[in-house]
Amino acid sequence: MIKSVCGYCGVGCGLEYDEKSLIGDVTYPVNFGSVCSKGVSELVSIQTESRLLRPMIRENIDEDLLTCKWEDATSLIAQKIKQTSKEKIGFYLSGQLLTEDYYIANKLGKGFIGTGNVDTNSRTCMSSAVVAYKKSIGADFVPLRMNDIFKSDLLILAGANTAEAHVVFHNRIKKAKKEGLKVVVIDPRNTDTAKIADIYLPIKVGGDIDFFNLISKRLIDEELYNKEFVENHINNFELLKNKFKRAPVTKMLKRTGLTQEQFDEFFELYKKSDNIITAWTMGLNQSVQGVDKNLALLNTHLLTGKIFKEGNGPLSLTGQPNAMGGREVGGLSTTLAVHLGFDKESVKKVSKFWKSENVATSAGLTATQMLEANLDVLIICHTDPIYHLPNRNKMEQLIKKIPFVVEINAYENSETAKYAHVRLPASPWGEKEGTQTNLDRTITRQERLTRQSIDSKPDWEIFQLIAQELGFKEAFNFKNPKEIFLEYQEMTKLNGYMDIHKADYDELSNNAFIWGEKIKGFLTPDKKGNLFFVENKLLSEKTSLEYPFILLTGRTRDQWHSGTKTNLPATLLKFKELNFCEIHPHDAQKLHIKDGDAIKVVSKRGELITKALVTESINEKNIFIPISNRDVNYLTLDLYDAESLQPDYNHSAVKILKI
Ligand SMILES: Nc1nc2c(c(=O)[nH]1)N[C@H]1C(S)=C(S)[C@@H](COP(=O)(O)OP(=O)(O)OC[C@H]3O[C@@H](n4cnc5c(=O)[nH]c(N)nc54)[C@H](O)[C@@H]3O)O[C@H]1N2
Ligand SMILES: Nc1nc2c(c(=O)[nH]1)N[C@H]1C(S)=C(S)[C@@H](COP(=O)(O)OP(=O)(O)OC[C@H]3O[C@@H](n4cnc5c(=O)[nH]c(N)nc54)[C@H](O)[C@@H]3O)O[C@H]1N2
Ligand code: SF4
Ligand SMILES: [Mo]
């Protein structure tokens, strides 16, 4: 029996494999044996015909790709890197890489090539939460665990559809409900998650800052905040209080789209709940004011002191399996390594540790900036930017201008593949080993369950080959992921609060390690939490007569993003429809659209064809298209949060045409 962990979502369920079947691990402290349809499909996805199996190469993207030897591909990549100045080189990584893969790629990019341009698709996913956590509590640190819901009285889910996106956690929520937990869901769509809520609040898209500000204002006005906690542990209280004095309450409520009765009913429950958790995901993060939305939410926990104690706290629900591990390693271009920034002291420490004189000295381009930056070399690994970046028509034009694009992927059918000059086959989940950190700091090891396909290699090994070709043989001489993990663990000692060095690699798959369990206070320099006054600036794209609908996008339960791993001919797991567009019956009627009709959805930037799903689950004037429709980003707008540079995926103005 081999123990491993699921490589799909941030819940990170424990699995067991007995050479024949893959099942949930009943002893694992996250899922206690349950798994969802994606978890069970892990093995099917390795065996599919759409695997990328050989390295391939071409001089320009109009030519066919030709199979080549690994040495030819890696030496060409090294040669291109050598010929290019470091600010023209970019590494576009992924929250689905294992920690060891991430560590090697970051060490090569930031440590030895010396470019800050090493970023990840987590930019499109969690960067608003990262920035806000840092500002508010002092570090990118999730201060509670999923199991805290069993010690809590109230769980608020804001812009999070756990029923489809964090399935096993959702089942845990249902269990906690039976033990008395109340659940409030704030979402413009009456999702499967909303259906289990004690109170469902159908917020108007983009109204979340107003909603959380209304909570904070009431807490202050009615003196319900925790005075002792605020006095001793919190900065900026007077400032916030003064700002709220003039806050336009009626307007704010109107912007939430909720009635006074709805808000009051919620606030009654809020007031009487001793222990509160607020969890959120893309409904807040993916926004032109994503950071501010996070801060407005975090304010409520700082005011009430409902943080750093059992059953309480702001719980960012990370999406990808190892987005947290990537952040810990330093995979975002705004960090250098192990949660350290680019200040002189950190650069010095890191240079000494890596024994390199070429460490990047300033933050580099974000993933959302890379295609627009006239790069000469772009290395993309374990992610599909042409599928996932907003305003796809524009992104397609931009990537064509990059003279040398390398794509490292385990599957052949990504959208980015069309633009790659070199394609390298990676070994996917099940054919490799390494560690990952789930959404609540649980570090576990994924195991190799089957042999490696003939010519594919684990991602860390691919980066190591490139590093060796570049002449960095001593610094990149790892024999296996364990050796990398040990070096990374040593490095975490550079950052006082990271106790990852206490984990035991050999033990990890049997015994998960939870880091940061001793942290019970703010990690800011003055050890105090920071309140921020934020306002809804209504910066998203507005509807017009021509484009009267707001498009929301998001997950559907049985598909993993672009579907290279889940939407397979051999998969019998397609229980739920993947191609649809939710539209309210009133809107459908006005447009003479019936359920199941083919429709064209058009924005100022592009269009797609899909199928109408007429449902009252969606507010009028909103439509929803799941990201299992690979064309979804032809419609979306490339508008970004000014601090996190995360895209505003959920607020594009569109029109609908019957075809
Ligand atoms: N099945 C499946 N599960 C996944 C993934 C997958 O591809 N498939 N991907 C993983 C990843 S990477 C991520 S990031 C997570 C994402 O996890 P979630 O964020 O929970 O998933 P989304 O479907 O993107 O949904 C966000 C919800 O926000 C709502 N929303 C939109 N705009 C607003 C708004 O203005 N305010 C509020 N309050 N809500 C709003 C949407 O209606 C939607 O229900 O899922 C992870 N899990
Ligand atoms: N409109 C809209 N756009 C969105 C979002 C949204 O909600 N709405 N969500 C955003 C978010 S939160 C995210 S996280 C992104 C996700 O967007 P992507 O990261 O682009 O989505 P995936 O399909 O998961 O891409 C992962 C790629 O890795 C490949 N792969 C699988 N296993 C391996 C392996 O072991 N090694 C290597 N090298 N490759 C492998 C897969 O074949 C696939 O091509 O999309 C973002 N884009
Ligand atoms: S909930 Fe997430 S981690 Fe658990 S089995 Fe499903 S996809 Fe895998
Ligand atoms: Mo994500």
Image (tube, rainbow, N blue to C red):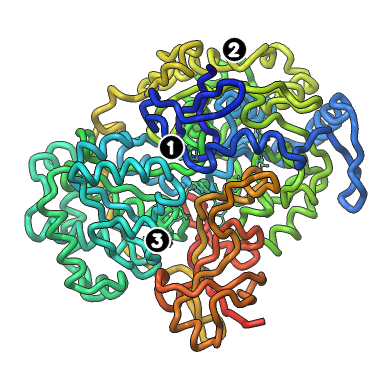
The amino acid type of the residue labelled 3 equals Thr
In the rendered image, which quarter is residue 99 located in?
Answer: top right
Q: Nearer the viewer, residue 645 or 100?
A: 100
Residue 86: percent from left, percent from top = 71, 35
326 relative to 36, above or below: above
Residue 223: percent from left, percent from top = 7, 54
Residue 197: percent from left, percent from top = 28, 57
The amino acid type of the residue labelled 2 equals Glu
Q: Exactly how many numbered labels are in the figure?
A: 3
Q: Nearer the viewer, residue 656 or 364?
A: 656
Q: Which residue is mark 1?
A: 11
Tell me if 377 is positioned left or right of 382 in this view: right
Per the model, the C-alpha gap separating discs 2 and 1 is 26 Å
Q: Residue at x 20, y 33 (%)?
A: 310
The amino acid type of the residue labelled 1 equals Val
Q: Which residue is mark 3?
A: 191
How would you rate the neighbour count of disc 1 (Cα within 10 Å): few for under 14, some for 14-19, many for 20 or more? many
In the rendered image, which quarter is residue 379 located in?
Answer: top right
Q: For residue 191, say whether it is visible.
A: yes
Q: Which residue is mark 2?
A: 483
Of labels 3 and 2, the one closer to you? 3
* Residue labelled 3 has its Cβ within 8 Å of some atom of ligand 1: yes
* Residue labelled 1 has its Cβ within 8 Å of some atom of ligand 3: yes
Q: Which mark is residue 144?
A: none
Helix, strand or loop at label 2? It is helix
Q: Residue at x 83, y 33 (%)?
A: 55
Q: Residue at x 91, y 43 (%)?
A: 59
Q: For residue 343, say whether it is visible.
A: no
